[in-house]
């Protein structure tokens, strides 16, 4: 198991390096520059700015310097906010983004598991079709469509919940969390249903029923752990996706999270900020996938034994 963990950690290094390289190249190839503005900048000023940030160095030199600084934990200064570093900007918006992602993940896990279990207990019934139809709608509706619809319905029509802001008024976290977590709840529901149907047909479940174990105990204590294996495997990428995919939701609901800086950086060609946030989120995706693999191995004795060989 320890060998497997070390191997997974080592494989993350080339993946992360490839992300850094591709992001660096693509950002530099994009049209425009960080100091292009609607008002023309004097040539001497532009030359001084490029010299200050070493943008006049050859591309390989710039990349080598960036990687060297990155190895020391330095994401560099922001071109848009000269007095602040990329690390400081990430630290400013990250807590809000994490909080939003956490609420969305809790919503997705709770609704998805409950819906999947109830659908699997009555397969091919109207309850099953109803839960899975709602799940399919959740998958098909992107957040930039679902968000405005929920604002229109629950914010403007019924006036039940605030339509924007974060920590401004009671209930302002409900609509963003549901909007962000809806698609993931649908995936969790489908995975849970599939896992439950497979587990409930196993011999040890029939044996438990034959011994008179109640249906509740069969589901909760015997079936649910095995049925949630696909959900655990999905949880890692889902957690990373919730954090990195919150940009649209943050924009719709005017939430001061990390997505605000990322979008502004893309519009302003703020190279270091784009690189910093991309590398940060890539690291999160790698980390959550790593944790999901470890949890999956821990929950599956057969997989754990095969890794130990």
Image: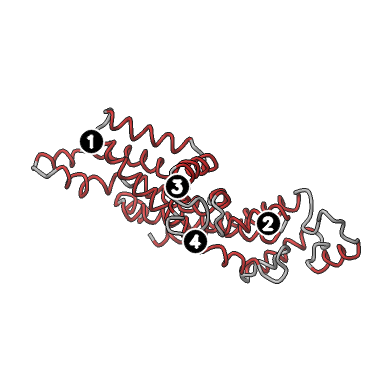
Way the structure is coloured: secondary structure
Instruction: Give the numbered dot on residue 265.
Output: 2
Q: Position of residue 118 (x, y in %)?
A: 27, 39
Q: Which residue is mark 4?
A: 168
Is 166 or 26 nearer to us in this picture?
166
Q: Secondary structure at mark 2?
A: helix
Lower sequence index among marks 2 and 4: 4
Residue ID at (48%, 62%): 167
User: What is the C-alpha distance between the residues marked 2 and 4?
Assistant: 26 Å
- Residue 183 seen in this snapshot: no
| Label 3 sits on residue | 159
Category of crowding for the residue at label 4, using alpha-carbon neighbours closer than 10 angstroms: few (below 14), some (14–19), many (at least 20): few
> Element under label 3?
loop
**Above or below, 93 relative to 253:** below
Name the residue at 40% across, 40% down.
Answer: 186
- Which marked residue is nearer to the observer: mark 3 or mark 4? 3
In the rendering, which numbered label is found on residue 201? 1
Residue 152 visible to an observer of this rendering: yes
């Amino acid at each position: 198991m320890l060998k497997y963990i070390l191997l997974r950690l080592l494989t993350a290094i080339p993946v992360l390096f490839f992300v850094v390289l591709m992001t660096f190249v693509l950002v530099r190839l994009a049209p425009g520059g960080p100091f292009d503005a609607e008002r023309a900048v004097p040539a001497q000023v532009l030359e001084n700015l490029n010299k200050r940030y070493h943008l006049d160095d050859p591309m390989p030199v710039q990349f080598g310097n960036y990687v060297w600084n990155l190895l020391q934990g330095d994401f560099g200064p922001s071109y848009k906010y000269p007095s602040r570093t990329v690390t400081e900007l990430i630290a400013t918006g990250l807590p809000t983004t994490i909080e939003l992602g956490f609420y969305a993940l809790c919503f997705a896990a709770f609704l998805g598991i409950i819906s999947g279990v109830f659908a699997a207990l009555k397969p091919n019934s109207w309850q099953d079709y109803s839960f899975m139809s709602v799940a399919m709608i959740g998958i098909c509706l992107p957040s930039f469509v679902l968000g405005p619809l929920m604002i229109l319905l629950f914010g403007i029509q019924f006036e039940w919940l605030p339509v924007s802001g974060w920590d401004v008024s009671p209930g302002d976290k409900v609509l963003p969390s549901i909007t962000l977590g809806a698609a993931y709840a649908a995936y969790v529901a489908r995975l849970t249903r599939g896992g439950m149907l497979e587990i409930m047909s196993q011999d040890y479940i029939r044996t438990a029923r034959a011994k008179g174990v109640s249906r509740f105990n069969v589901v909760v204590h015997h079936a649910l752990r095995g049925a949630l294996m696909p959900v655990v495997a999905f949880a890692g990428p889902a957690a990373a996706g919730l954090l990195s995919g919150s940009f649209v939701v943050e924009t719709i609901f005017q939430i001061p999270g990390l997505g605000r800086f990322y979008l502004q950086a893309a519009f302003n060609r703020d190279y270091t900020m784009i690189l910093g946030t991309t590398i940060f989120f890539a690291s999160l995706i790698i980390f959550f996938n790593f944790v999901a693999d470890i949890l999956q191995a821990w929950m599956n004795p057969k997989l754990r034994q095969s890794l130990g060989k």
